[in-house]
């Protein structure tokens, strides 16, 4: 992507403390390992009502112990805001959790479209040995509530069991 209002960010293993189920395994890894990078176009200020943001995320292949590489995951700060994700390259899963901590996963592949309802936390896991790339479009006033996930996590984890993804209650 190129143009005005473009921002780029990266998440390495060092920046994902307490995000994976096995924190001891994460802390023992090479802390410089890239997990995912995001390019986003933010044409208006964060918090502006009635605007839209667009982003593309690339998640590297890998696991922390048996848990696939994942994005941090969040509810929206303005909790009633929804979002679209869609798969571009590679395969993985969108993990969704409502406010009652009910979890479900949708498989993501090139061309798959995912509507993330309001009041629903969301994160992506890369379940293959290649990079997973997806895009997102969300309201510019949605914001991020990362603390809820940092403090309480998701109720289910997507783990690599016998070489295949399995949604497991933790
Ligand atoms: Fe979001």
Image (cartoon, rainbow, N blue to C red):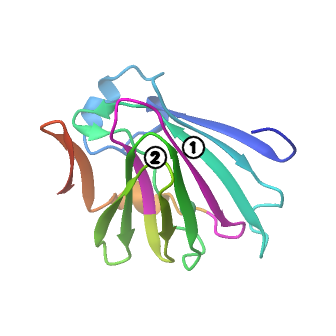
* Mark 1 sits near ligand 1, with its Cβ under 8 Å away: no
Secondary element under disc 1, as helix, strand or loop, is strand
Pick the front one: 24 or 57: 57
The residue under label 1 is 57
Foreground mark, 2 or 1?
1
Q: Which residue matches tag 2?
A: 71
Q: Quadrant of residue 57?
A: top right
Ligand 1 picture quarter: bottom right
Q: Residue at x 74, y 42 (%)?
A: 7
Question: Can residue 16 be seen from the camera position used here?
Answer: yes
Q: Is residue 46 left or right of residue 146?
A: right
Q: Locate the N terminus by quadrant.
A: top right
Q: Are marks 2 and 1 in contact (CB under 8 Å)?
A: yes
Q: Residues within 10 Å of mark 1 (few under 14, many from 20)?
A: many
**On screen, residue 161 above or below 107:** above
Q: Residue furthest right?
A: 4
């Amino acid at each position: 992507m190129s143009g005005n209002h473009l921002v780029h960010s990266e998440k390495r293993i060092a920046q994902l403390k307490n995000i994976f189920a096995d924190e001891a395994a994460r802390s023992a890894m090479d802390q410089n390992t890239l997990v995912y990078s995001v390019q986003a176009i933010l044409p208006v200020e964060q918090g502006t009502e009635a605007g839209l943001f667009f982003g593309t995320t690339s998640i590297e292949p890998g696991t922390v112990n048996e848990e696939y590489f994942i994005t941090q995951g969040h509810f929206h700060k303005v909790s009633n805001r929804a979002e679209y994700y869609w798969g571009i390259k590679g395969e993985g899963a969108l993990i969704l959790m409502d406010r009652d901590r009910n979890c479900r996963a949708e498989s993501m592949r090139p061309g798959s479209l995912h509507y993330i309802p309001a009041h629903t936390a969301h994160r992506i896991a890369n379940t293959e040995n290649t990079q997973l790339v997806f895009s997102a479009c969300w309201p510019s006033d949605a914001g991020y509530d990362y603390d809820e996930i940092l403090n309480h996590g998701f109720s289910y984890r997507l783990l690599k069991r016998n070489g295949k993804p399995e949604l497991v209650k933790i």
